[in-house]
Image: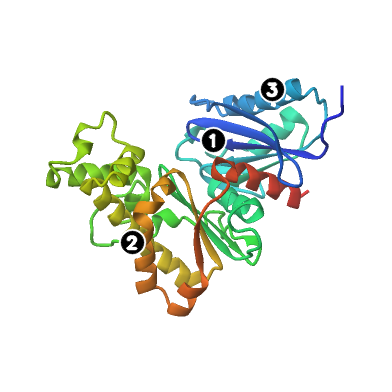
Amino acid sequence: MSEGPKNLIFAADLGGTHLRAATVDERGTIHFRSKQNTPQGTDPNQIVTAVVNAVGEYKNESGATDGLKAISLVVPGTVNVDAGTVVKAPNLPCLDGFPLASALTSELGLPAILENDANAAAVGEMWQGAARGCRTIICVTLGTGVGGGIILDGELWRGVDGAAAEIGHMCVDPFGGVACTCGSRGCLEVFASATAIVRMTREASPRYPDSVLHNARALTAQTIFEAGLGGDELGLQVFRRMGVYLGIGLANLINILNPEMIVIGGGVVNGWDLFEKHMLQQVEERAFPLLAARVRIERAKCGDDAGLLGAARLAIANP
């Protein structure tokens, strides 16, 4: 049997629904992938076991007994990177306060690090994606919620408590009254997430009695986007509104941080052709002209691999 590649990082992306894993080398090449359902119980050790099983799956499939250099896990929540603990994971509350890194090291005998999922996605896009060659970027992830990652002069900005770049909770409509799960109102997340697109469609549907969306078997961001592509006025209106609020948020970020690039990823980016014009119009109207002319706003290129690649890159850079 031929010897497998050495110095691989076992990267795992712990989502609320799925645990995705991959082995990644120092060039950013992915050698192995796996996907399983995320354990939904109240015992955090179930998640440890799931990661250990994924490592075992890799070893069985590749025939490799060594070659792994470290474990790098990204989590949808606030992480204390230095301590290797999850501070708060709203979709996986069993992990709150849990020393996940040391638990993985204990089981696998390998160094383990943790990172927030949106931060890791930003690192992945700068390493292998849309922002290659850039050093100051903002990554905005439009999914079930809205996440963010900020890299300043090549360094990931985590903030003093590890909770920086909560871009989804920037207020873009203080008097609109739409409540956010964070406890505030008018957050970007209530206008630019997949959840928001569905809510806004339901709210606006009585004004569009001829919309094809009234007959949709399942109302999702994707079906709304597809309706808009077909010329449905309700779908077009919802993505126009979403683009306006996203553009307001991006203009604020541009004025504060003066980035080289803003990378926009996540499932909602599928609607790019419907919201891009409205987003860019707000940036043009609200950001300082010099800064707006400098920044590039682009779609992410790494897709679902952004977090895995970022996790690997962080482990490579911090041996």
Q: Residues within 10 Å of mark 3 (few under 14, many from 20)?
A: some
| Front residue (pair 288, 54) | 288
The quadrant holding residue 216 is: top left
Residue type pointed to by label 3: Glu
**The residue tagged with tag 2: helix, strand or loop?**
helix
Which badge, 2 or 1, is on the more N-terminal residue?
Answer: 1
Q: Residues within 10 Å of mark 1 (few under 14, many from 20)?
A: many
**The residue tagged with tag 1: helix, strand or loop?**
helix
State the CA–CA distance, disc 2 to disc 1: 39 Å
Q: Residue at x 64, y 29 (%)?
A: 51
- Of badges 2 and 1, the one in the foreground is 2
In the figure, is residue 303 to the left or right of 107? Answer: left
- Of badges 3 and 2, the one in the foreground is 2
The quadrant holding residue 21 is: top right
Q: Residue furthest front?
A: 230
Q: Which residue is mark 2?
A: 278
Q: Residue at x 52, y 30 (%)?
A: 18
**The residue tagged with tag 3: helix, strand or loop?**
helix
> Which percent across, then down, holds residue 186?
30, 56
Residue type pointed to by label 1: Leu
In the figure, is residue 177 to the left or right of 190? Answer: left
Residue type pointed to by label 2: His
State the CA–CA distance, disc 1 to disc 3: 23 Å
Q: Which residue is mark 1?
A: 95
Q: Which residue is mark 3?
A: 57
Q: Residues within 10 Å of mark 2 (few under 14, many from 20)?
A: many
> Which percent across, then down, holds residue 118?
53, 49
Which badge, 1 or 3, is on the more N-terminal residue?
Answer: 3
| Front residue (pair 58, 170) | 58
- Mark 3 touches mark 2? (CB < 8 Å): no
